[in-house]
Amino acid sequence: MPTIDLRSDTVTRPSPAMRRAMAEAEVGDDVFLEDPTLNLLQERAAALFGREAALFVPSGSMGNLTCVMAQTRPGQEVICETNGHIYNYEMGALAALAGVLPRVVNGEDGVLTWNAIVPAIRQKVYYRPQTSLICLENTVNMAGGSVYRTSIVEEICDRAHEQGIHVHLDGARVFNAATYLNEHVSAMTGKFDSVQFCLSKGLGAPVGSMIVGSRDFIERCRPIRKMLGGGMRQAGVLAAAGLVALEEGPKRLQVDHDNAQVLARELARSPGIALDPSKVQTNIVIFSVKPSGLSSADFLAQIAVRGVLAVPVDADRVRMVTHLDVSRSDIQKAAEIVKATLTVPHDTNGKTN
């Protein structure tokens, strides 16, 4: 039975064009700055974001950590949203490796505002940890792919800079945000001190993320990347796929967004699911199965045997993500499977009667 994999937009397979580009890539040793394909990818990423330079990293988590370490000192504080990826899903690296203390702030639908951030900024006294960095995430993964309006971002950056505080963007899915806003990524992100974005989320590359910023900033990041184990050699085989992803991936993201809307509307029709389709902005659909009497674990186990994969958010909520390897018919079939699963009577322990 074919599987419809909605666990993440990271599960996509390289396209034939990517595989050809990888096979034919001209390569060199990137630790010596001699890989021409990787250098080209970095140049194109920098130009796309209107920045002086860019740096390829193996993962978004390494990219975020590298940016944090380049803009903080141990003992300082980093403000991030309560449900942010950098706080919840990166192995506590802020504290364990960067030596900084996360200070979390609640945002409505995961979106922080300057007014929400201000109370968390430390007073400038020597015996208190100082706020050095604010980290935003766009789109906001665990808020169902919600999007920051650019005016909110710019106010945060402007006010933070007035206080000598840097601002970093975890833009893992920033191209999804750009598609939703119908804006260019360079205009959306120009006031951030650093930006990390993923080539492997939504854009279809098999691996890799990029950091963009000033030339001085990227040169500070390069030895940190090496220290964290990210100094790769003939990485052009990965960069070649990244070049295809960067060129072709953003053009088709609206398809994923449209499919997510279809999925959300179909799921919302089930009495066993709590979901507001109007909250779905990009390619992530998060919903509760609590009305069904099932836990998220039981629900996921039951749809998995029917050929649909998703992931739990918590005991009651589930996340599904649309991507280039699922079609409209796949989405409709997945919704039918979910609805059929939830029409089976369950007892209070989630077992079928």
Image: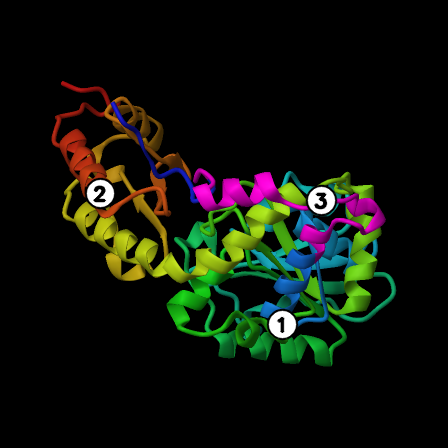
Mark 1–mark 3 Cα distance, whole angstroms, equals 47 Å
Q: Secondary structure at mark 3?
A: loop
Split into 4 quadrants, where in the image is the C terminus?
A: top left
| The N terminus, quarter of image | top left
Give the spatial CA distance, label 2 vs label 1.
37 Å
Secondary structure of the residue carrying tag 2 is: loop
Q: Give the quadrant of residue 289.
A: top left
Residue labelled with disc 2:
273
Specify the quadrant of the image occupied by residue 318.
top left
Across and down, in percent, residue 222 comes to: 80, 53
> What range of the chain is rendered magenta?
11-39
Among the two numbered marks 2 and 1 on one chain, the one whose residue lies closer to the N terminus: 1
Residue 27, which numbered label? Answer: 3
Q: Is residue 165 above or below residue 279?
A: below
Few, some or many residues within 10 Å of mark 3 (<14, 14–19, 20+): many
Residue at screen point 75% across, 40% down: 232
According to the image, label 1 marks what residue? 118
- How many angstroms separate mark 3 from mark 2 (CA)? 50 Å
Q: 30 above or below 261? A: above
Identity, as a three-letter code, of the amino acid under mark 1: Val
Between 291 and 9, the one lying in front of the other is 9
Q: Earlier in the sequence, mark 3 or mark 2?
A: 3
Foreground residue among 214 and 47: 47
Q: Secondary structure at mark 1?
A: helix
Where is 36 relative to 6, above or below?
Answer: below
Cβ–Cβ below 8 Å for labels 1 and 3? no
Q: Few, some or many C-alpha atoms within 10 Å of disc 2 (few <14, some 14-19, many ≥20)?
A: many
Residue 90 shows in this picture: yes
Discs 3/2, front: 3
